[in-house]
Amino acid sequence: MSSSVHDFALPDLGEGLTESELVAWRVSVGDRIELNQIVADVETAKAVVELPSPFAGVVTALHATPGETVEVGAPLFSCDTGEGGGAGSVAPGAGGVGSAAAGADAPSDAEGRAAGADAPSDAERPEPTLVGYGAAAERGPRRRARPGVSAGASPAVADVAAATASIVAPRLDHGGERPRSTPPVRKLARDLGVSLDDVAGTGERGLITREDVERAAAGIRAPSRAPGEIDSSSAAGAESFGAPGTVVGAAGAAVGGRPAETRIPIRGVRKHTAAAMVQSAFTAPHVTEFLTVDVTATMELLRGIRDDREFAGRKVTPLAVVAKALCLAVARTPEVNARWDEEAQEIVRFGGVNLGIAAATERGLVVPNVKGAERMTLVELADAIGALAETARAGRTSPADLAGGTISITNVGVFGVDAGTPILNPGEAAILAMGQVRRTPWEHRGEIALREVMTLSLSFDHRLVDGAQGSRFLADIGRILREPGLALTMS
């Protein structure tokens, strides 16, 4: 490989994350790219992140396929920056992943790597810095190469080589090696929640087939056969391995008389959320208090803002008003805006409010936060919350927006729910849940009238916040929502 070809190692995208899943490539082998051009989307444990290139040049290899998990420090793609000129570079316009060789006279990147031509050592190869994310992480262990395939070969070349090797190579023991299968079979295994490490291949020379994965998903042992015997089973034929009348070997089929199951791998945002919630629930002693409030005056305020020309195009919601009320109440009860430092045995009180807003997305729950929320006006806070929500729904929340939260709000009212017992975000002392606004018969000025009513639920860490402090904080928020004008008297 030419000395002008550099590997881009996947960096740590925030808070010590050790791996990311490749969602999609934005480039192909042979594409010419510019500095800071987005080359891939990867999903961390918190969000989908766009990766910009620290190089300008020609893409010579892609080292992962969409859906594959890549460890921090492992090579993601290679780029010829044009600083030298030798074997291993791919001319602009060459075919993408899965295409044939770039040209009859141009050796492929895989051939260049296999030959080892001019290949610098890892110590000699310069380590790039991911633009916009600080220094690159230390290089971690590379993914193990498949037998007979160079570690730097493109995924398509590696898959073809593996399929070919399955015909001529002896059957592999999985110990220490990657189980051999085709990309569609690996995708099926991911969809069914099956680990290929636990599947015995019944294809030619131990290749794992679609039927092997389907049997594993159904909990059926693979049929025994003599070495070298051709496996002719199919999804339909797999029925003979189960109990009479039980269909097995197909996704969604009934197993052992139980209703059909769908297995969903736990990864990405949902995996991180699950771990964080378990940690919070079993380390912080939660207390939850409830307060039902007549918010008719707040809703009238919002209708007035909506009809005011000065605020045309600005979306001010009940969530924004609750967020503003929370910031004002924090100033009177700072104990709720704090964290517990177990190692130092100290309560750390935050000097400002980075307000987390829980957002439900297709990938799971994320809680980006508005930095310096206590300094914002109501309309500024509404704009900031709207921007965070839009970015979260698009799956583009940045690691910086997810880090550093001090206290949070979750809006369960948008789902038609009145109240709940929210779980604290780790490292925070309180979280407020706001329920839906209902028109309810309510006592008003000595009579019964239809009023707009909301229930607030406050969970707090009883190590940091005692009952009186939590109650005062919740009551202050309720007073502001009941009569927004009272905010002018609070300090």
Image: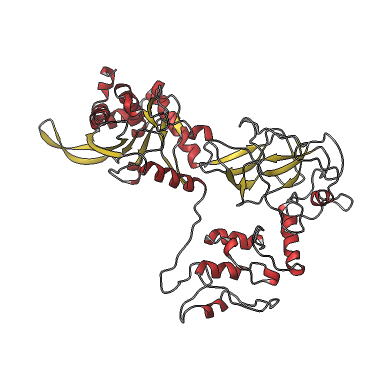
Residue 57 in which image quadrant? top right
Q: Is residue 27 left or right of residue 241?
A: right
Q: Residue at x 57, y 61 (%)?
A: 189
Residue 98 in which image quadrant? bottom right
How far from the left and from the top, in percent, is residue 407? 38, 31
Q: Is residue 126 left or right of residue 287?
A: right
Q: Residue at x 65, y 57 (%)?
A: 176
Where, quadrant-wise, is the C terminus in this rendering? top left
The color scheme shown is secondary structure
How far from the left and from the top, in percent, is residue 394? 51, 41
How far from the left and from the top, in percent, is residue 381? 41, 27
From where the camera sits, is residue 362 visible? no
From where the camera sits, is residue 365 visible? yes
Which of these two is toward me, 92 or 431?
431
Residue 436 in which image quadrant? top left
Given the current orientation, which residue lies at the most extreme right position? 105
Given the current orientation, which residue lies at the most extreme left position? 446
How far from the left and from the top, in percent, is residue 455? 25, 38
Q: Residue at x 48, y 67 (%)?
A: 252
Total number of numbered labels?
A: 0
Where, quadrant-wise, is the N terminus in this rendering? top right
Which of these two is toward me, 242 or 100?
242
Which of these two is toward me, 176 or 76?
176
Q: Is residue 459 left or right of residue 11?
A: left
Q: In the figure, 462 relative to 195: above or below? A: above
Q: Is residue 73 left or right of residue 482?
A: right
